Image (spheres, grey):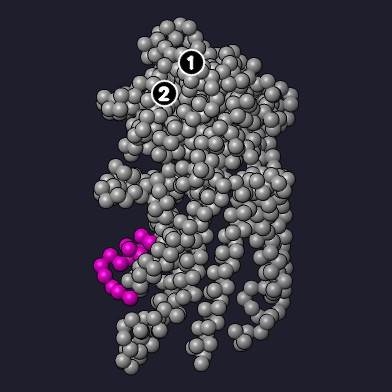
Amino acid sequence: MKTFKNLRVILIMTLLVAVLSACGSKSNSNNESSSNSGASPSANESGKVPDPIELLNVSYDPTRELYEEFNKSFALYWKEKTGGKITIKQSHGGSGKQARSVIDGLPADVVTLALGYDIDAIAEKGQLKADWQKSFEQNSTPYTSTIVFLVRKGNPKGIKDWGDLIKEGTQVITPNPKTSGGARWNYLAAWGYATKTLGYDEPQTLDFIKKLFNNVPVLDTGARGSTATFVEKGIGDVLLAWENEAYLAIKEFGDKFEIVTPSISILAEPPVAIVDKNVDKKGTRAAAEEYLKYLYTEQGQEIAAKNFYRPRLQSVVDKYKDQFAELNLLTIDDDFGGWKEAQAKHFSDGGTFDQIYKPGS
Amino acid sequence: MTLLRKKDRVLPGLSITLGFSVLYLSLIVLIPLAALVIKSADLSPSEWWDTVSDPRVVASYRLSLTTAFFAALVNLVFGLLLAWVLVRYKFPGKRIVDGLIDLPFALPTAVAGIALTTIYAPKGWVGSLLEPLGVKVAYTPIGITLALIFIGIPFVVRTVQPILQDMESDMEEAAVLLGSYRARTFFKIILPDLIPPLLTGFALAFARGIGEYGSVVFISGNMPMKTEIAPLLIITKLEQYQYGEAAAVAVVLLLISFVLLLLINVLQRWSNRRLRSVKGG
């Protein structure tokens, strides 16, 4: 009987400990970022920098190759400049999902996402200042891209411009603008073309877009998924793609595809920003700033261009001008009134994209 | 059971074990589910209703529920067959086949989805053979059902298998000796015992299918109103930072599933009781 009593006491104790630790970890989970960087809070307050420095760059899918190369180059540059060691961790995924992770506490030092809209969403939660886009040159967009067509070798359907995409029997592959940042650029580029060629008539423009999306047999959730559908599964006649994704596909399977540049497209600006709250907590602001500034230097721009992103620096632009066809580029700010307006009009629930799929239409 | 006095149970008394169960269930299941409901309460009642009654959302519920139902039905029949073969026959490689059954549990669902899509896409191995016959699998509800069959198969096999194993063949032999036909033996002697585990397996596969995301998004084509599953719509809303709307859709999906599972449970109890009264009498 006595052993039973002892056992009972032990069990109760264990249970209490379990409960307490469960409660403890629960109250911690709300500010996970602080517990991660909590190693040196006092060091930060006295202005010291952690050593060695570690940065986390939270980015979207197609920049994987770009940042692998860029981070190596930056680490060398940092060592030369300060003599210190810096390591940069990368995180990739759909742009919106990445932004949500940062909102929910992923301790990103910098974010390099597909759309300003996604960074705005983080800013709304107070993790960085509202006018973040003014922090760096060129709208905080060190490299740009655009939307082009990838077609099968020989262009059997004779696709030259957006107008060819609404022909009957042409299959267009694009991801879903509701789940993919890249797809929103696709959609807006098509919208911009239709607006200009149809004399700024909104119902006609909507009709054009509706016809285009009626030719879409599969809506993948992300840009990489669409590329796989087109390239590997052999579905569709034309893929609407980021220019850099199209080039990557050509690089990989050069003999099977070709790039068609439409007459009008959009200047896709994937911006970068420092996550103020996290860098201040970790004491990594200086390094994070230097990291993003390095994107604008000759070396950074060269790496961007090599990875098929359009550089901003004139000397690098000149060097790579054969790689990037010149075309008429719309911009989100001038032609669509910025991301807030574009999002509300086209992609929010009940927006133009949803109207395409209204029942009975 | 009655040989053990109440005090001498292996685990300590009811108050502690029950306390632990409630706490554990709360932390793991109830609190997260409550958070979901609370999140959906961010919306005003009219917003809430507009979100969950949107034609596109309703279409996605219908699609998710029907494909999960048919997939579970297919698994019910073929899962039983698989379990039967594994229990009643000896053949070379039996252990390997038995091990294969669990693989859909272990495989990341996205990998399964991509593999199935590659094979059943119009230009894939199987898809290219079906295309001339006018059968389209990938990017149709058939493809979704296929993915759900794949992820659901272990549920039925693994719930039926142990019951089948315990079943003694005496009764079958007796039935046959007494001149019963094969079919009669199966339906009168074997099947009644299997109905409760079959229903459990069906319910598990069905529930899993309703919420399945990873393996389906690749093969479904995600076309609004046609092949857009409810979990994808939830993700879509999250992607637009509409946490309230996403939670509302999820809550409705949970409610529907809960009612359906409850029905299956009632059915199971009923068949259990009937079985006992038949056996008893």
Q: Position of residue B57 (x, y in %)?
A: 56, 47
Q: Nearer the viewer, residue A15 or A226?
A: A226
Marker disc for residue B94: none
**Stretch of the chain drawn in magenta:** B88-101
Cα distance between the residues tagged 2 and 1: 14 Å
Q: Secondary structure at mark 1?
A: strand
**Residue A177 is at least partly visible in this image:** yes
Q: Return the x and y of residue A244 as percentages of the image width and height.
A: 42, 23
Residue A168: give x, y in percent of width and height.
36, 33
The residue at 62%/54% (across/down) is B252
Where residue A201 sits, quadrant-wise, is top right
- The tag earlier along the polypeptide, 2 or 1, is 2
Circles 2 and 1: CB distance less than 8 Å? no
- Say which of A66 and A159 sits in front: A159
Q: Residues within 10 Å of mark 2 (few under 14, many from 20)?
A: many
Q: Which mark, by number, is residue A329?
A: 1
**Mark 1 crowd level (few <14, some 14–19, many ≥20, 10 Å Cα):** some
Quick one: quadrant of the N terminus of chain B?
bottom right
Answer above or below: position of A219 versus A134.
Answer: below
Q: Is residue B88 above or below residue A355?
A: below
Query: On the same chain: label 2 and label 1?
Result: yes
A23 or B140, which lies in front? B140
Q: Which residue is mark 2?
A: A162
Q: Is residue A194 above or below residue B268?
A: above
Residue drawn at x 43%, y 36% as measured from the top left: A214
Query: Does dot 2 land on a helix, a strand or a loop?
Result: helix
Instruction: Say whether residue B89 is magenta.
Output: yes
Pinpoint the chain carrying mark 2.
Answer: A
Q: Nearer the viewer, mark 2 or mark 1?
A: 2
Task: Tell me which residue sits at (52%, 78%) in the image.
Answer: B271
Q: Amino acid at mark 2?
A: Trp
Residue A184, given in percent of the width and then of the height, sits at: 52, 29
